[in-house]
Amino acid sequence: MTRAFVFPGISSRVVFGAGTISTAGAEVARLGHSRALVLSTPHQEGEARKLSESLGPLSAGVFAGAAMHTPVEVTETATAHFRASGATCVVSLGGGSTTGLGKAIAVRTGADQVVIPTTYAGSEMTDILGETSGGEKTTRRDPAIRPETVIYDVALTTTLPVGLTVTSALNAIAHGMEALYAPDRNPVVVAMVKDALPAFRDSLPEIVKSPTDLVARGEALYAAWCCSTALAYVSMALHHKLAHVLGGSFNTPHAETHAILLPHTTDFNEEAVPGLLAPIAQVFGGGSAGKGLWDFAKALGAPMRLADLGLTEADMDRAAAIAMKNRYDNPRPFTEADIRALLQSAWEGRRPS
């Protein structure tokens, strides 16, 4: 039977290398803008101000209030700041929190986005926006959310703490994992994921040993781009649903939540689609995709238990109930009891069995 698929093409411009942050001004100008607001978290405000200075007259200032899980109230404050600054473009410097804020401003104002990721989280290539309000996180997709330009500067990742390096990379692997079994997957994204998996396997142990290793950092950032791009063109399933529930309703840290859930959500769906997840098992060993990812994460020193994020068993009951609302498509059907059992394994940090 002839295979059939749709691949819409990669629309974001990508600038990849070391020292590429120096091209930010040229990329803003290339998009036709004369004023850009630089965004960051409070933690990265110093780097954002340096970037703002480098933009010279193109800079409309800095908003350094980005927060985890993109709270709507923060977005409203930032959007008002954006409008008052006279900017028509945002430059987002940082991880998923800053990228999310830039997307939220863009979808409300029509602003173009230049994103400069400093982690491996991967939302910079997607048309996905998750926002938190009233204790719950909602997610939507819209072409207007996708950034116009993404600048990957390997040099910026050399100071990323080892712990966040590991969890952020496992977050990226989760994007690739879900792309492998997505109903709307295509040969291009599957090939990118298959290229990313061994790059992560080989580079992350080297980074743990030598955090400033520019070659290993470059391989990891390339792999993160592959997985981010894959997620951008497929549907999300159970893994991302659970990560959004825990993050939005319990305020758990984004990368750590993805990292802890990954072996368990992979193992759950592997029962239904072992062939589609075989590339993970082949790369990471362990006898199965879920076990291989658990072993890899443990060897890297990643957090393994949801309990260590401050969650209780009672929280797992509530999370399982929330997860049953607005279900995502998933290759394996599930009940609330299934989700509760999966979350218990992740809460305890057990190796998938």
Image: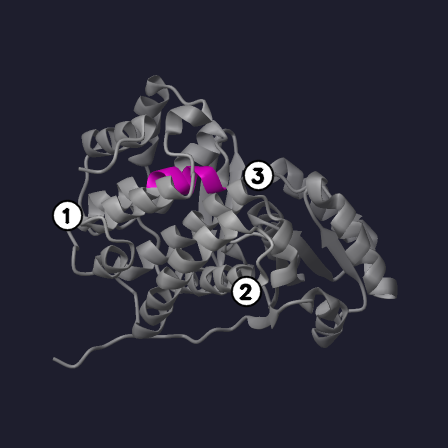
Determine which residue is flagged by label 3. Answer: 68
Circle 3: residue type: Met
Above or below 287: residue 315: above
Circle 1: residue type: Glu
Along the polypeptide, which appears first: circle 1 or circle 2?
2
| Contact flag, marks 3 and 2 (Cβ < 8 Å) | no
- Please state the horizontal and vertical placement of residue 96, each as a whole percent of the image: 56, 48
Farthest residue in the left direction?
1
Above or below 352: residue 272: below
Tell me the magenta residue range. 255-261
- Distance Cα–Cα, label 3 vs label 2: 29 Å
Q: Nearer the viewer, residue 268 or 279?
A: 279
At 42% from the left and 34% from the top, the residue drawn is 303
Determine which residue is flagged by label 2. Answer: 215
Closer mark to the observer between disc 1 and disc 3? 1
Is residue 7 shown left or right of residue 141?
A: left
Determine which residue is flagged by label 1. Answer: 271
At 21% from the left and 59% from the top, the residue drawn is 278
